[in-house]
Image: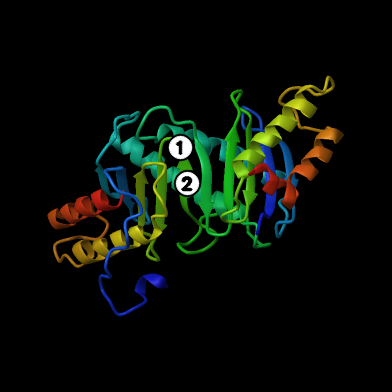
Amino acid sequence: MAAAIYSLYIINKSGGLIYYKDYGSAGRMDTNDSLRVASLWHSMHAISQQLSPVSGCSGIELLQADTFDLHCYQSLTGTKFFVVCEPGTQHMESLLKYIYELYTDYVLKNPFYEMEMPIRCELFDINLTQAVQKDRVAFLGR
Amino acid sequence: MQFFGGSEISPSPPVPTASGNNGHMMYVFNRNGVCLLYREWNRPLRTLNAQQDHKLMFGLLFSLKSLTAKMDPTIAEKGNLGVPQLPGQGCSFHSFRTNTYKLSFMESPSGIKIILVTHPRTGDLRDSLKYIYNLYVEYVVKNPLYTPGSPIRCQLFNTTLDQYVRGIA
């Protein structure tokens, strides 16, 4: 049962990286690279909507690369959450929805948080660390 | 390379992963980004003219490839984002899925890119794309009247392709 999550990104509606956490990928990305990758993903997500053969496309949900899977969830307000995980990892949609819940509870309801700005909330960090643990992820699938 | 393994020139097609006419369209690009072939079977929505559409598709694939090469969590030394890479170099991707379509992608060692857009619920099409690559080799590359790098106009290739895609997706 592999459920290794390599990293998590949260980007705001204009493509700026507001949260990045690495859970042990080889060669951690530096700040500049993570910002570039995040905004590149934002653009690719938008282009994929333009290329849809049928109407009503809301962008890439899953990207399957040779060595990883990327699952993306876009909230109604345009904030995108995406995780990089091992190929074939299960329950990632529910994990992302759960992370969105944590975000609304511990970030958006924090009176000191400024919208669209990098997330620095201790409670969010603590709860997130618990959520991405292997057994918890498996629990989300039930 | 797996493309050249085995003695069979044209192996039998892989087992279909879905049934019914779920194929939307297909693109073939060469390594210079020239669209060699564009086929469409079912495309109700068209936001751009054909040329712009092909450019946008090639740009999307190019950028997604540099993104996956940079993001690869298994390799420590990945180089800089956006540096052009040779076919087969760096971590590539084989498909992505949105709520309305699934795009499967294959790149041959010579830089031929085959893109198949299907219904989002289609299964893994990697073997099918390899089979399509074989069709390309058989009907296009081996055609003495075909000039490499020019748009594909081979009747036999088109009909075989149509027939095959209707069967798989």
Chain for disc number 2: B
Mark 2 vs 1: CB contact within 8 A: yes
Q: In the figure, is residue B151 to the left or right of B117? A: left
Residue at 70 percent across and 45 percent down: it is: A139
Mark nearer the viewer, 2 or 1: 2
CA separation in Å, label 2 and label 1: 10 Å
Where is residue A21? Give x, y as percent. Answer: 74, 45
Q: On screen, B153 above or below A122?
A: below
Image quarter hosting the N terminus of chain B: bottom left
Q: On screen, B85 above or below A138?
A: below
Where is residue B143? Give x, y as percent. Answer: 16, 65
**Within-10-Å neighbours for mark 2: few <14, some 14–19, many 20+:** many
Task: Indicate which disc residue B63 carries.
Answer: none
Residue at 66 percent across and 54 percent down: it is: A3
Report which residue position mark 1 lands on: A48
Q: Choose between A46 and B15: the one closer to the eye.
A: B15
Q: Residues at marks 2 and 1, common chain?
A: no
Report which residue position mark 2 lands on: B96
Residue at 57 percent across and 40 percent down: it is: A41
**Within-10-Å neighbours for mark 1: few <14, some 14–19, many 20+:** many
Which amino acid lies under the numbered mark 2 shown in the image of this protein?
Phe
Where is residue B95? Give x, y as percent. Answer: 45, 50
Which amino acid lies under the numbered mark 1 shown in the image of this protein?
Ser
Which residue ends up furthest to the bottom in the rendered image?
A: B7
Q: On screen, B111 above or below A53?
A: below
Chain for disc number 1: A
